[in-house]
Image: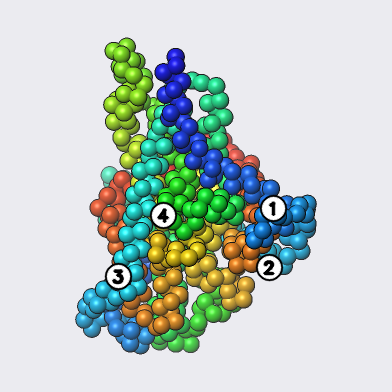
Amino acid sequence: MSVPGRVTPVLSHGFLAAWALLTTLPLLWAVLSSFKSDAEILTDPWGLPSRLRWENWARAWGEAHIGRYLLNSAVVVTAALTLTMVLGATAAYVLARYRFRGRQVVYYAFVGGMMFPVFLALVPLFFVVRDLGLLGTLPGLVLVYAAYSLPFTVFFLTAFFRTLPTSIAEAAMVDGCGHFRLFFRVMLPMARPGLVSVGIFTFLFQWNQYVLPIVLMQGDGAEQRWVLAQGLTALAVNEGYRGDYSGLFAGMTIAMLPVLIGYTAFHGRVQSGLAAGHLR
Amino acid sequence: MRGKRLFIAAFLLPPLLLYGLFVVSPYAQAFQISGTDWRGLTPEYEFVGLDNVRRLAGDGLFWNALGHNALLLLLLPVTTILLGLFLASMISVGGRRDRAGVHGVRGAAVYRIVYFFPQVLSVAIIGVLWSQIYAPHSGLVNGVLRAAGLEALARPWLGDPRFAFWCVALVLLWSNAGFYVVLFGAAMQAIPRDIYEAALLDGATRVTTLFRITVPLLWDTIQVAWVYLAVIAIDAFAVVQIITDGGPGFASDVVGLRLYKTAFTDAQFGYASTIGVAMFFLTLSVAVLFLRVTRRDRVEM
């Protein structure tokens, strides 16, 4: 322990770098493989691509429909996220700032939803969606995503609205501001930081859904409306048979990059948003 | 006052309607369906009472799957939390030590960004990626082994019943550990550095400070982490389904996959709901039991 300053950093850097390598190497390998030929992938999984074969990407985007799945995902998540934020914010606001009978019951009904495993609901949910004629449709998926995002959104935003000062709201009411105007003009803008945190958390929750789409996007022609997670796994099965490994890696890379780039650009916010979602 | 009532109704009814229709009613129906022999084709079904529960008790495939979940429950939270604590303490106090005290390592920000990558990727991407990594000929694992001259160790990882489950378990560890490094790292920021400095001056080792200082002060965070990882261990559906589909045979099967196949492959919706109810009570009792056992006095600073 005479020169601890020299020993410890080397050791900790060693461990830290090893885990960083373990995390990034598989991702990097997928990106590199997306530029290889199938022969290169099969004979030399470890080597570099001999040239950048963008045609793999084109094939994954077009023939393998990754482009369409990406678009479906974008449409579903945009709509579902909007719906979640509107319904979550309005419910949370009323639950946080108004006193009325049954308020506690409603609040715990929402928050209690966080405790149930989604598997319990899977079978009945399939039939609820089917009976509404929404099986295999994008609107059906949007409604279900939003419904299953509500417990956390309501929980988080109720707590957030409670922290906002009451004086401004009271002053606005004295000035004759109505309930609706007060919410949209005063409270909602004040709640922006909370909305951003819960929005990021919900975006990733919905974008990365797997169980819900594979159960609900069944039926005739549903593969036209598959989302990315579903399309990619189907691609993995199909390309395995056809032996188009490079197309699979290209599809994987296309699915991976938007999220990784978006995350790296806003990593601080994403991390605090997910951490906040975790410590609920 | 009418304005207020109208306002509350307008703001609360739409979310309640959506929530009731797609979340509350399915959960309630699940308990009801679990008592039937419903096969989904016809609206008729019969209540079979506890027959499904009896069938569950004697269902070897269910117990096989449950055994894998139990193994995950035992190992995944502990290993993930230990790895997370270890790496997080490396980041926040593993750096240079001099007269000015204990430092974080250089490049801590980069580590935090990189470690988080798997957390933002969907399970579908992680599953497909790792099924390729484990692939017998084109996979990265065997590729590395061959490149290192360890040809003898290369094998069809997912095709071997001895390894398939552990391969999947490693993927779960890989995809979750980074998040907890970041989470514990953030919590460690709140611990004053001079506590570590004092302990190290008194001759404590790094390991001692980890278990005697860091763990007690982070206890609340660790508890929450354990519960979350337990939920992941009881689920584990997506990763298993994508990477091995429970195979080879049933060597890596988990309860969620049993439920999914019973319902959507075999169309035995009544029995599948019984499995769902079992999962619910399992989750609930594990959470309650854990919080009971680990309750201890908070360490105040």
Q: Residue at x 52, y 32 (%)?
A: A107
Left or right of B36 in this view: A145: left
Other-residue count near label 4 (Cα within 10 Å), few / some / many at <14 / 14–19 / ≥20: many
Element type at mark 3:
helix
State how far apart marks 2 and 4 are (Cα). Answer: 35 Å
Gap in angstroms between the C-alphas marked 1 and 4: 29 Å
Q: Give the residue type at disc 4.
A: Leu
Indicate the chain on which mark 2 is placed.
Answer: B
Asked whether the residues under marks 1 and 3 belong to the same chain, the reply is no
**Label 1 is placed on what type of residue?**
Ser
Q: Which residue is mark 4?
A: A138
Number of other residues with Cα within 10 Å of mark 3, as a class: few under 14, some 14 to 19, many 20 or more: some
**Which disc number belongs to residue B61?**
2
Query: Circle 4 marks a residue in which chain?
Result: A
Pointer 4 with pointer 3, Cβ within 8 A = no
> Around disc 1, counting alpha carbons within 10 Å, would you say few (fewer than 14), some (14 to 19), or many (20 or more)?
many
**A94 to the left or right of B241:** left
Where residue A275 appears, x then y in whole percent? Answer: 40, 45
Q: Earlier in the sequence, mark 1 or mark 2?
A: 1
Along the polypeptide, which appears first: circle 4 or circle 3? 3
Picture coordinates of residue B140, whole percent (x, y): 39, 77
Label 3 or label 2, whichever lies nearer to me, is 3
Give the CA distance from mark 3 to mark 2.
Answer: 40 Å
The amino acid marked with disc number 2 is: Leu
Whether residue B124 is visible here, answered yes or no, is: no
Residue at x 37%, y 51% (from the top left corner): A77
How many residues crowd around disc 2 within 10 Å: few (fewer than 14), some, or many (20 or more)? some
Q: Position of residue B150 (x, y in %)?
A: 44, 85
Q: Which residue is mark 1?
A: B34
Tell me, for residue A198, which label it has, or none.
none
